Amino acid sequence: MSTDNKNKQQPLELPENAYTQLKPGEEYVPIITREKGEPEVTGRSIVFGLIMTVFFSAAAAYIALKLGQGIETAIPISILAIGFSAFMAKMAMRKSGLIENVNILAIGATSGIVVGGSVFTMPAIYMLHLKGGFWQIFLVPFLGAVLGVLFLIPFRRYFVAEMHGKLPFPEATATTEILVTGEKGGSQAGILLYSLGIGVLLDYLALSYHAWTDTFTTAAVKGMAFFTDKLRGVFAMSTSAAVLGLGYIIGIRYASIIMAGSMLSYFVLIPLLAHVGGPAYAHLNYEQIFSDKLLGVRNIGIGGIFAAGVISIIQMAPVIKQAVQKMMAQLFKHREHGRTEAVSRLDRDIPMPLVFGLIVLVSLGIFLYFRFSVLAQDAHPTLLAFLALALTLLIVFLFSAVSAWAVAMISVTPISGMTLTTLIIAAVIMSALGLAGQSGMLAVLLIGGVVCTALSMSGSLVTQFKIGYWLGSTPRTIEWSNIIGSALASVTVTGVIIMFATVYGYGAPTTQHAHPLAAPQASAMAAVLNAFLGGQGAPWMLYGVGAIIAVIVAMLGVSSLAFALGMYLPIQLNSPILLGAIVAWMVQKSSKNPSLSKARNDKGILIASGLIAGGALAGVLDGFTKMISERIGWEPRAFHFSASAQNWAGLIVFLLLAAFLYWDSRRAKGPGQGENSAASEA
């Protein structure tokens, strides 16, 4: 029987070793292995992907700028791709293939990437009263996205193959389960659908209808007033189904480290600063002590993330060296008789000579942009433009791998923290060379914008690479799809940003714009620029404390990046991740029968994936609900419980959901086992 026939007859199932470390000599074989004949880049995948790019770019930009909240785009696009495939089948046309849907995802997901890079930085142009037109705003996210793709290509094999089973890849796991289960159908599709429905229902009721609070906090408990007001010690927990599912997939190890970082921030540093920090902290509540731009504990987290990033770069030095060596070897490889060694479709990237050429081309574009547009009026425009380019390339190259590692580890990349770090480094260097005023602020901001988008791309692209690795997509297809999608997403987002600047304005109210948009991330970037280039100073002591903590944690053999992320992220996000990880640990230890434990855990992963997808969809629905309600002056509030009742109701619902996740996962049956025998193994 031919290889193609074998592929056609094999079941649509992820291999047994999809989520486990490979034994010596063992190889991972994806679902789709054929070299030719499998639909991947098709007219429908390109058109549908581009439609998703425009729609979600506009929607995500609108919601982020108007309402100050981001929305997940990759998972909704995956679900819509599956629905589109089912619709085509009902119309008596060919269903979209598995890796064809991955191509739709690769094109459409650039919407979230570009929005994250743009809205974090570009509105600050208007807040600082700088000159910014269409091309200035468009080029920053587009060039950053392209750099993010090109600089991650040399690290692809390391993250997806060499680290297989060693990093959890939570978002990639959830998306892969959705794509495979949606394509396969059957009982597993039912599990995914009802868990998705639960996630949508619970999160949407909390977000839009306020049936219960979406975050339980001891600050709302009257009996905890002493701890809240006097000690400034507060525990909080998000009640989102999505975060519970995320914790299940992340696992107990990383979830514990992240939570340890949060406990240090919330139960040690915040109370400590409240009592020994002097008058500057005496009048601040616990939230302000955590998030204040100059005094906040979150600055310690930023310092920790930067130091942890440097430590990660040092630890990855052999990998970076190997990636550079491979790139240079392929770049200068001698071709014999005009032919190169055949490479499997599953391991085929954009050719390294072309990657190098594109990097040079993008670098030239950035240099010309800074030299003749941003710094043209400065005394030393060529030197400063070259320095700005060098900073951009160095930081993107080094921190792209760190961003990818963070996403592979906990599905969260500290883009804002690393971008703030970039702004600080660039501002210090540029100001030392005499650059100041509006041209200095604009130059540093645009460096930060390119870096921000590149890091956003790295985090999303490593997820797509892993999905493609599991399913059998061609890496080169994913890479080109992201570059093409980024161009259209950048055009769309730039249009939204400029339109909102004209209609609403950003930052502080003015006579022209009485009710401007908050754009909180960009506001933070503007504050940093004012601090360094406007003479307001910076929290160097807090950055230094965070850096030292990260070094100490690394010396103890603990992941300093995970710990620093815990210090930086709010505790309400990290505590439910730990609870989800505990549920996963309990499920994995619920039977002494290895096959039954695996079956239960596999079902738990599927349920968790559905909860993540449901939470993502609920966020999108909530964004549109708020957008519509703001237009017509109506707020959907079907429940009128007291704040205390909503607080406790949120915790109870969340704990019941965790109990359901454990109970339903344990109902899974092992191979060849009936319901009774499965129960007897418990």
Image (cartoon, helix red, strand yellow):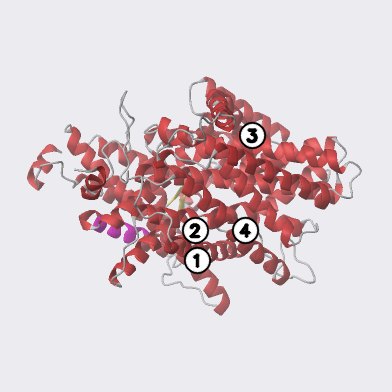
Magenta residues? 189-199
Q: Which badge, 4 or 1, is on the more N-terminal residue?
A: 1
Q: Which badge, 3 or 4, is on the more N-terminal residue?
A: 3
Residue 606 located left or right of residue 417: left
| Majority secondary structure in the magenta region | helix
Q: Which badge, 3 or 1, is on the more N-terminal residue?
A: 1
Residue 610 belongs to magenta span:
no
Q: Which residue is mark 1?
A: 51
Mark 3 → mark 2, Cα distance in angstroms: 34 Å
Mark 2–mark 1 contact, CB under 8 Å?
Answer: yes
Residue 542 located left or right of residue 218: right
**How many other residues sit within 10 Å of disc 3, few (<14), some (14-19) or many (≥20)?**
many
**How many other residues sit within 10 Å of disc 4, few (<14), some (14-19) or many (≥20)?**
many
Q: Which residue is mark 2?
A: 108
Find residue 43 and report its horizontal and vertical position in percent.
Answer: 44, 63
Kind of element beneath mark 4: helix
Q: Which badge, 3 or 2, is on the more N-terminal residue?
A: 2
State which quadrant residue 451 falls in.
Answer: top right
Q: Amino acid at mark 4?
A: Ser
Q: Amino acid at mark 3?
A: Gly
The nearer-to-camera label among 3 and 4 is 4
Q: Which residue is mark 4?
A: 490
Residue 473 located left or right of residue 219: left
The nearer-to-camera label among 3 and 2 is 2
